[in-house]
Image (tube, rainbow, N blue to C red):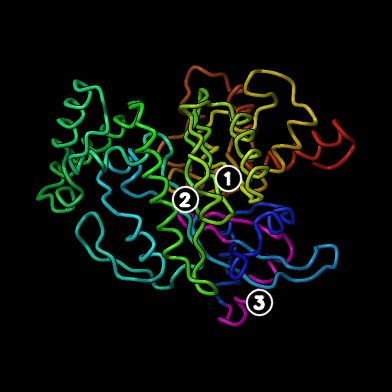
């Protein structure tokens, strides 16, 4: 089990008291500071808020070995990513991604890798840890079809899907477009192709097992104790009148993580059912697992609403379970920022920063401003941090 580079996930995340947006460190004073001053300022920042931050594809974890009650500084900062897709994700494949698990890991470790568009790329600084979180829904199906594997039993659906996939432009075609109009036209084809991932293929159990075993094996193969940590995981891509996606991160041996198959939205969109699956994993293997919600900015108030999936009142048991399995949230990525929104932080100059390619609150023209504000309060991390204390005190007279 991986304790050498990142402390046990449960020991780490139970000490996290806040989620903040890292880019606000870029103050004028910081720009004038020397490199050594920047390091001290950053260290002090993390001391004050003990935060976990996700910036685009970078998640910063502060590994805390001493209780915050002792008023000590974090020991180390680790840089990594818990939300990477490869060609095993149906939406990534249909939009041009051909990066394999091996390539993704090698890139994270600093190797020079050829991207789907044909160019070579490498990181200036290798990451400390990585979790590849391909979508559980139909994981590996498109990649297998591209290799001629007939993983879909419905012949008509199979023929139609192959026809659509073959007609798609490649990322290289788009990058090498001769005109702007050609670039936009080809890009739009890939954007529309993302809808192909909605197809439910009812994949054979043996195929699902083969793909998941590959995910585990590649993570183990690239694990370098004391240098580079890999986590086995996947994305749970649920929807409930809004995006309620979560990345599931496992802690355990290969035998333990191979003992399950990913629980997906095809099984249920109810997060409580997901947590039951996670609890079963812990109970039967002795391992650990957490869920990391992301893109709550696109959830239309569903991610942190004041009732359960079935519309029931939040209970002590429900909140206790969620606190156990969801101690952190991914607040920023290319689909927008999930820290706060102008509707709920009108005096914050940064509230309008990186709202993403589509603002599901402002874009919902049929909703009144009061409904939009309420949805914002139930979608963004800052308001949830404020609300959790009130909820906790009202239910069991403690801060939640």
Instruction: Report helix, strand or loop for mark 3.
Output: helix
Q: Residues within 10 Å of mark 3 (few under 14, many from 20)?
A: few
Say which quarter of the image contains residue 61: bottom right
In this image, 9 relative to 242: left or right? right
Contact flag, marks 1 and 2 (Cβ < 8 Å): yes
N-terminal label among 1 and 2: 2
The quadrant of the image that shows the C terminus is top right
Figure check: 103 above or below 34? above
- Identify the residue at horizontal 51%, vertical 35% (top origin): 263
Rendered location of residue 323, percent (x, y):
72, 41
- Identify the residue at horizontal 26%, vertical 59% (top origin): 115
Residue topped by disc 2: 83
Residue topped by disc 1: 292
Q: CA distance from mark 1 to mark 3?
A: 29 Å
Q: Residues within 10 Å of mark 1 (few under 14, many from 20)?
A: many
Instruction: Report helix, strand or loop for mark 2.
Output: strand
Q: Nearer the viewer, residue 212 or 99?
A: 212
Say which quarter of the image contains residue 386: top right
Image: magenta residue range:
33-60
Instruction: Report helix, strand or loop for mark 1.
Output: strand
């Amino acid at each position: 089990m991986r304790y050498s580079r990142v402390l046990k996930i449960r020991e780490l995340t139970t000490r996290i008291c806040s989620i903040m947006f890292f880019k606000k460190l870029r103050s004028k004073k910081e720009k004038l500071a020397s490199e050594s001053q920047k390091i001290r300022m950053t260290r002090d920042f993390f001391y004050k808020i003990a935060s976990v931050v996700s910036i685009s594809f970078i998640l910063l974890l502060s590994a805390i070995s001493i209780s915050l009650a002792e008023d000590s500084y974090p020991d180390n900062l680790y840089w990594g990513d818990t939300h990477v897709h490869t060609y095993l994700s149906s939406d990534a494949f249909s939009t041009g991604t051909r990066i394999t698990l091996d390539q993704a890991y090698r890139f994270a470790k600093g190797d020079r890798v050829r991207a789907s568009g044909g160019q070579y790329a490498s990181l200036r600084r290798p990451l400390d840890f990585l979790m590849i979180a391909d979508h559980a829904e139909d994981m590996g199906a498109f990649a297998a079809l591209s290799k001629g594997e007939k993983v879909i039993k419905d012949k008509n659906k199979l023929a139609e899907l192959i026809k659509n996939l073959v007609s798609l432009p490649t990322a290289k075609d788009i990058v090498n477009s001769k005109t702007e109009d050609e670039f936009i036209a080809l890009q739009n084809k890939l954007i529309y192709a993302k809808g192909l991932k909605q197809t439910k293929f009812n994949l054979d159990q043996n195929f699902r097992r083969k793909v998941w075993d590959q995910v585990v094996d590649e993570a183990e193969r690239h694990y370098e104790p004391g240098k580079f940590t890999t986590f086995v995981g996947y994305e749970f891509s649920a929807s409930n009148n809004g995006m309620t996606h979560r990345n599931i991160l496992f802690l355990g041996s290969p035998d333990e993580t191979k003992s399950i198959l990913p629980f997906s939205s095809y099984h249920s969109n109810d997060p409580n059912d997901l947590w039951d699956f996670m609890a079963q994993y812990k109970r039967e293997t002795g391992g650990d697992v957490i869920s990391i919600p992301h893109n709550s900015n696109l959830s239309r108030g569903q991610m942190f609403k004041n009732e359960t999936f079935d519309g029931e009142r939040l209970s002590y048991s429900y909140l206790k379970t969620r606190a156990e399995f969801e101690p952190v949230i991914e607040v920023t990525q290319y689909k927008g920022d999930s820290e706060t929104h102008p509707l709920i932080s009108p005096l914050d100059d940064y509230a309008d920063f990186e709202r993403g390619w589509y603002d599901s609150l402002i874009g919902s023209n049929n909703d009144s401003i009061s409904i939009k504000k309420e949805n914002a309060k139930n979608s963004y991390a800052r308001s949830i941090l404020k609300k959790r204390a009130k909820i906790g005190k009202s239910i069991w007279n403690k801060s939640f």
